[in-house]
Every structure is written in structure tokens, then in C-alpha cells.
Image (cartoon, rainbow, N blue to C red):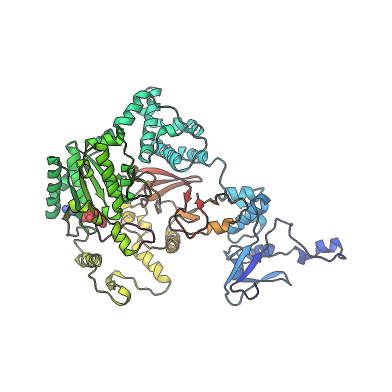
């Protein structure tokens, strides 16, 4: 290790007065104890230094970057030059109890001034490091799911509570479902009871049916959980007609109906082609090719409203959850058609004969599939095969009109570590179904009507005809750029995008219409931190609980797991403020607008649950609860273990 660069410094960690002291066998015990030097350790001197320099906000492990340890005087001295060093606390096994929790606190609390300071949360000094760590939210409570429901009950929103209960069933692996049910039943039915004079049995079945309805979207059903049985009458309704009932009861928006009269020429042409195909009843496959902003969603909504008003069932789906939330009654194609993951060339969707989904497809006039170019061709082929099979009709999509849409200039199918040719080969245009697809085009950018230069530039990029320089680089026009002039340019960027932020805290459309996008997690974290500092209000911090399965010998210390940043997991430390916008990273329930990419506004925080309000799409304004959910870093071949972050 001699001359290793950067040098690695081992930091002492010990409980109060439990540090090691060196002495000679001839030394007198009283002298050893009274010698001030013997009471000084790296840790106690770190506390001392923070006490005397209260502006410092270092973690123990950051400290050696700024201070150097003199083992003769047993004191820290400020470094004259900044040096790249790595500091690690000695590892401590969880079975060591208090020392393990002390280490956990030191890894999270900045500028600790004493052992007592570490044990103090708010105004309360806890008797143990364990209790302090628990109150800092660093330790998972034994009863966390019960506590989560209990926290949510305080808000008295039964509909959101029912969804939360289902989210817990689906994503949080509860061990005692019946106990959770019993504790929350009364709160979940509060609005049912007050809205009707229904009998207890009716109310019970209504709740079970609502929960089952959500579970079914995730290929689960109520009988898989330890819950009361639904009575046979209700079960039949659930099994056979619930999906049809659901579709037929979707509200038709007047605005979308009125929009039909303002469709532009190409939108109008497509509208008539599609509605005519449905009237004729001969099926057909169509693809609306439209670059971003050309009014595809506007057109879909008009078509959906027109057909649904006439009693047609049109299944609105999209390749991504976020696109699905923009469509009335939208769902992801994966959940709607029970598409298997991963998909293979010969896969079938799980649409069995005599199932509720098969009955729904029998009644269905059309399928709308937005962002189709993002999906692998195997997905379409498997849905096509399965619908033909389920309806016993050897016509594309069993004779149901399929209306796909999207832009080939946007995201292609994801092929992990795929070459360009593999990605192209995954596209729907190479599918055997594609020759039967009629392509309809939209070209006028309706979003940027007043910004011709921008829409032209965007289209040129998408079409690959914008001139390029060295390394195929495109030059972005100066009018769209905030020049890089050092770190403070980031603050300029934030103040330009979020100008007048404090005056617009409660203005929905302000938050809906602006965002900072960046491809790397690291930059996301950096920007989030900066934005949150500018955002008014008190900061709340949540820490994830990270674990590795079967790590009996604690090979992977907590701070290693906590510092892992991978693309599909949120960070270990999540700082939020009331009123701040957030983005969800999982498809929890696309039908109610909770999917990967949904944007929400934080409303209230409790230890185990966040209350938030959906910011965009069809479910804008809806209140929801977000519990802690265990997420795994599946599919990351770079890591030798599977990390679970809760
Ligand atoms: N015929 C129209 N009349 C008035 N406004 C329209 C019309 N068509 C589209 N718009 C408006 O133009 C904007 C862009 O439309 P829309 O979101 O439907 O485009 P898109 O093709 O779905 O975009 P993207 O691919 O980015 O999702 C929206 O604000 C929409 O309301």
C-alpha cells in the first residue's frame, strides 16, 4: 500500500470511552487515564474540530480531504494543499450493535460535534445510537407497511388509500395481508358508506372488486392474497364484464368532441379514414407518422371521443406509461394485453379464451397504440398472434382496427447493448405485419406554430439533414443556448428555466411546462440539489434502505450500497420540499396516471409515505400516496450482486 495514490486513510470508530489506548506494562493506570493525549482519537478530535469551526459541514469520511491527522500530537491539522485522499471508517458488522449504528450515523450526519450531538434528533436526545438512527429515518421500522397505511389514513382520502393498499399488495411483498386489511378496512370504505345506504356485504364486495380490478391489470388477482372472498355474484361480474363496463363508462370529454371541428387538413383526413374503417368493420392497420408536436395526441383524443360517444369500445394504449397517461382511459400496451417480459419471437400474450380480456376484445372496435415505434416488433407480432387466437379470426389483430402512431425520429426500440442493425431489425417496419400497414402522415408542427425556426431545426435533426461538423456534431443555434462560462452557468440555466419561481409555487401550468433534462443520474442529482436550494420551504430527507440478498457476512458495507448510482434506481438520499415537482420512476398504476415518468407535486410528507398530486395528463390534480417500494437493479451486468433499494 506504500505510495498508493490516492492514499487511503482508515478512520477510527469507537463508542464513547471505548477507544484503544497504547501503554507500557510499567505505566501506572491512573497516569494512563489522566493523560489528556490518551483521550484523543481521530473521532473525538473530529468532533472537537467541528465544535470550534461551526461553519464546516463535512462528513467524517470527507474530513481527511481537508485535514491531516498528526499521530504524535493526536490532532487534526488543516491541509495546506487540497489532496486527493480516500477515507474509510473501519468496517463494523451489524451484530456489533451500537457501534454499527454509530457508524451509520457518521456516514449520514454532517458536522457531528459530539456523541450526544449524533444522538439528538430535533430537540430529543435518544438513549442509543440505534434509536437515533431510526428517528433519522436511516433504519427500517419493523412495522413499516402498517405505519405507512397509518400515516396515509391521517389524510382521510379513502380512494387514494385503496390505491395505496393495492400498490402495497403488488410491489411491497407484505407478509400479513389480512392484518393490514383488517386495520384499514374501515378507512378504505369511508366514502362508500357515506355515499349510499348499501349493506355491509355490498360494501365489502365493492371494495374487493375495486382492488381486484387494479390487480388484474398487473396480471394478479384477489384470490392470490389472504383477503376475504368475494361473493359469487360479484365474482361473476368481475370475471366477465368488468373490463367492458370499465371501457363503456369512460367519460367522453366535450372539449375533445369540439376539437373535431378544429382539426387541420391532414388531421381531418386521417380522422375520416379511421372512422370509415371502423364503420366498415373490415379491420385494417394504420400508422400515423408525425414528428413531435404535429398534433397526434390532439387527433387521437378527437377520434376516441367521437367513437366512444357512439358506444364503440376503443382501447387506448401506448408503449410507454407516460404516453398512456395523455390518453383518456389510456393504459400501457404491456398491461392491457398482458404482454410477457422478456419478449421472444414466438411469445404469446396471456389472453385466454373465455377470459374478461377476450370478451373485451370481442366487443372492441379499435385499438389505439401510441409511440408504436418504441416497441419491439415481437411485441406487435405476439399481440397480433394472441388476438387472432383468442378471437379465432385469422385476420391481422383479429379484424380489430389497429391505429398506431408515433415518430420514427423519436426513441427506437431498446435493445440492450444492441448494434445499430439489431436496433433497426427490432423496429416494426421490419415486421411481416408492416406491408399491410397504411401509413398516414402529419407534417405541420402545431406546437411550434409561432416558432417556425425551432420546428424546422427539430425536423432537420430528426430527418438527419441538419449540417454536421467534426465527429457528426450538430451546431445548436446560438438563440437556443446559454453559453458555458464556468459552474455558475448552471445557476443561470436554472434561473432562466425557472424564472420567478417563488411567485409561481402554486401555479400548475408553470411547473407543467418546464423541465431540465439531462442523461446522467449524476447530473440529475446535481441539478436537483441546486434547484431545491432555490426552492422555498423546509427540506425533508428520505434515505433508502439498501440490501443485498444473502449477504450473511456483511461483505457489502452500507455506505458502498448507499453510494451506488445506477440508471434504474433512485438515489439513496432523496431530498424534497413541499410544493416541489417530482417524477415517478415506476409503472405503479398507469390507469390512474401513476407510471414511469409521471410528474407530481409533493403535498405532504410523513415518515413512510409521500402525499402527492398528479401534475400532468388525464389525471391531473388527483391526490395519491407513494409508499416505499423495494426496487432491484435487475439487468445490470456490471454489478456482481443484486441490490434492493427500498
Ligand atoms: N388542430 C389543432 N388545433 C389547435 N391546436 C392543436 C391542433 N393540433 C394540435 N394542437 C396543439 O398542438 C400542440 C401539440 O399537439 P400534440 O401534443 O397533439 O402533438 P403530438 O404530435 O402528440 O406531439 P408529441 O409527439 O410531442 O407527443 C398541443 O398543444 C395541441 O393542443
Comparing 430 with 511, the one in front is 430
Where is residue 254 drawn, in percent x and y? 19, 42
Toward which corner of the image does residue 452 lie, by quadrant? bottom left
Q: Is residue 90 left or right of residue 324?
A: right
Query: Residue drawn 19% across and 53% down?
Result: 435
User: Any magenta on residue 310?
Assistant: no
Counting from the top left corner in percent of width and height, residue 638 is at 48, 60
Q: Nearer the viewer, residue 362 or 395?
A: 395
- Residue 196 visible in this rendered orientation of the protein: no
Drawn side of residue 281 relative to residue 463, left or right: left
Residue 159 picture location, percent across and down = 38, 36
Ligand 1 image-quadrant field: bottom left
- In the image, 41: left or right of 526? right
Q: Nearer the viewer, residue 99 or 317?
A: 317
- Can you see residue 642? yes
Q: Is residue 173 above or below residue 549?
A: above
Quadrant where the N terminus is found in the figure? bottom right
The residues colored magenta run 407-418
Query: Where residue 398 sits in the image (x, y, percent)?
Result: 22, 41
Q: Is residue 413 magenta?
A: yes
Q: Main secondary structure of the magenta part?
A: loop
Q: How many marks?
A: 0
Amino acid at each position: 500500500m506504500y505510495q498508493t495514490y490516492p492514499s487511503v486513510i482508515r478512520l477510527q470508530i469507537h463508542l464513547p470511552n471505548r477507544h484503544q489506548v497504547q501503554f507500557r506494562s510499567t505505566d501506572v493506570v491512573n497516569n494512563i487515564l489522566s493523560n489528556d493525549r490518551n483521550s484523543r482519537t481521530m473521532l473525538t478530535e473530529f468532533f472537537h474540530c467541528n465544535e470550534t469551526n461551526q461553519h464546516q459541514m463535512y462528513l467524517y469520511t470527507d474530513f481527511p480531504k481537508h485535514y491531516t491527522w498528526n499521530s504524535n500530537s493526536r490532532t487534526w491539522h488543516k491541509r495546506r494543499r487540497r489532496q486527493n485522499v480516500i477515507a474509510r471508517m473501519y468496517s463494523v458488522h451489524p451484530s456489533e450493535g451500537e457501534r454499527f449504528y454509530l457508524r451509520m450515523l457518521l456516514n449520514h450526519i454532517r458536522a457531528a460535534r459530539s456523541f450526544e450531538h449524533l444522538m439528538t434528533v430535533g430537540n430529543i436526545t435518544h438513549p442509543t445510537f440505534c434509536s437515533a438512527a431510526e428517528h433519522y429515518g436511516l433504519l427500517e421500522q419493523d412495522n413499516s407497511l402498517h405505519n405507512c397505511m397509518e400515516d396515509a389514513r391521517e389524510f382521510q382520502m379513502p380512494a387514494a388509500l385503496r390505491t395505496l393498499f393495492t400498490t402495497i399488495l403488488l410491489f411491497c411483498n407484505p407478509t400479513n395481508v389480512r392484518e393490514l386489511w383488517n386495520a384499514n378496512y374501515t378507512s378504505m370504505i369511508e366514502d362508500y358508506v357515506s355515499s349510499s345506504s348499501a349493506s355491509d356485504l355490498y360494501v365489502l364486495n365493492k371494495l374487493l372488486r375495486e382492488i381486484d380490478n387494479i390487480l388484474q391489470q398487473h396480471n394478479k388477482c384477489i384470490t392470490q392474497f389472504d383477503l376475504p372472498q368475494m361473493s359469487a355474484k360479484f365474482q361473476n361480474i368481475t370475471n366477465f364484464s368488468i373490463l367492458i363496463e370499465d371501457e363503456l363508462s369512460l367519460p367522453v370529454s366535450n372539449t375533445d368532441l369540439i376539437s373535431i371541428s378544429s382539426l387541420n387538413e391532414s388531421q381531418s383526413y386521417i380522422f375520416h379514414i379511421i372512422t370509415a374503417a371502423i364503420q366498415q368493420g373490415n379491420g385494417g392497420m394504420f400508422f400515423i407518422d408525425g414528428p413531435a408536436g404535429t398534433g397526434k395526441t390532439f387527433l387521437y383524443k378527437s377520434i376516441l371521443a367521437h367513437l366512444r360517444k357512439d358506444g364503440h369500445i376503443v382501447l387506448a394504449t401506448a408503449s410507454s406509461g407516460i404516453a398512456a397517461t395523455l390518453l383518456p382511459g389510456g393504459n400501457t400496451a404491456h398491461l392491457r394485453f398482458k404482454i410477457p417480459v422478456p419478449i421472444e419471437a414466438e411469445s404469446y400474450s396471456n389472453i385466454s379464451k373465455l377470459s374478461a380480456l377476450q370478451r373485451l376484445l370481442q366487443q372492441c372496435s379499435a385499438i389505439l397504440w401510441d409511440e408504436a415505434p418504441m416497441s419491439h416488433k415481437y411485441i406487435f407480432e405476439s399481440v397480433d398472434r394472441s388476438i387472432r387466437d383468442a378471437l379465432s379470426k385469422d385476420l391481422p389483430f383479429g379484424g380489430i382496427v389497429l391505429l398506431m402512431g408515433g415518430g420514427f425520429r423519436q426513441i427506437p426500440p431498446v435493445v440492450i447493448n444492441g448494434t445499430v442493425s439489431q436496433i433497426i431489425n427490432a423496429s416494426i417496419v421490419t415486421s411481416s405485419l408492416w406491408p399491410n400497414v397504411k401509413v398516414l402522415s402529419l407534417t405541420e408542427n402545431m406546437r411550434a406554430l409561432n416558432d417556425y425556426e425551432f420546428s424546422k431545426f427539430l425536423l432537420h435533426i430528426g430527418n438527419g439533414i441538419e449540417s454536421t461538423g467534426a465527429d457528426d456534431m450538430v451546431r445548436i443555434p446560438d438563440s437556443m443556448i446559454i453559453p458555458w462560462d464556468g459552474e455558475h452557468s448552471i445557476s443561470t440555466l436554472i434561473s432562466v428555466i425557472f424564472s420567478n419561481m417563488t411567485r409561481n409555487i402554486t401555479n400548475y401550468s408553470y411547473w407543467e411546462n418546464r423541465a431540465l433534462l439531462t442523461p446522467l443520474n449524476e447530473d440529475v442529482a446535481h441539478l436537483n440539489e441546486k434547484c431545491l436550494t432555490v426552492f422555498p420551504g423546509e427540506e425533508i430527507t428520505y434515505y433508502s434502505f439498501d440490501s443485498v440478498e444473502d449477504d450473511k457476512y456483511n461483505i457489502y458495507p452500507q455506505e458502498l450500497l448507499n453510494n451506488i448510482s445506477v440508471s434504474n434506481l433512485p438515489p439513496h438520499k432523496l431530498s424534497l420540499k413541499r410544493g416541489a415537482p417530482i417524477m415517478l420512476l415506476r409503472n405503479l398504476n398507469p390507469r390512474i396516471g401513476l407510471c414511469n415518468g409521471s410528474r407530481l407535486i409533493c403535498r405532504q410528507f410523513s415518515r413512510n409515505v409521500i402525499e402527492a398530486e398528479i401534475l400532468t395528463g388525464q389525471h391531473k390534480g388527483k391526490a395519491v400516496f407513494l409508499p416505499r417500494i423495494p426496487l432491484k437493479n435487475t439487468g445490470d451486468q456490471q454489478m456482481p450482486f443484486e441490490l434492493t433499494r427500498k
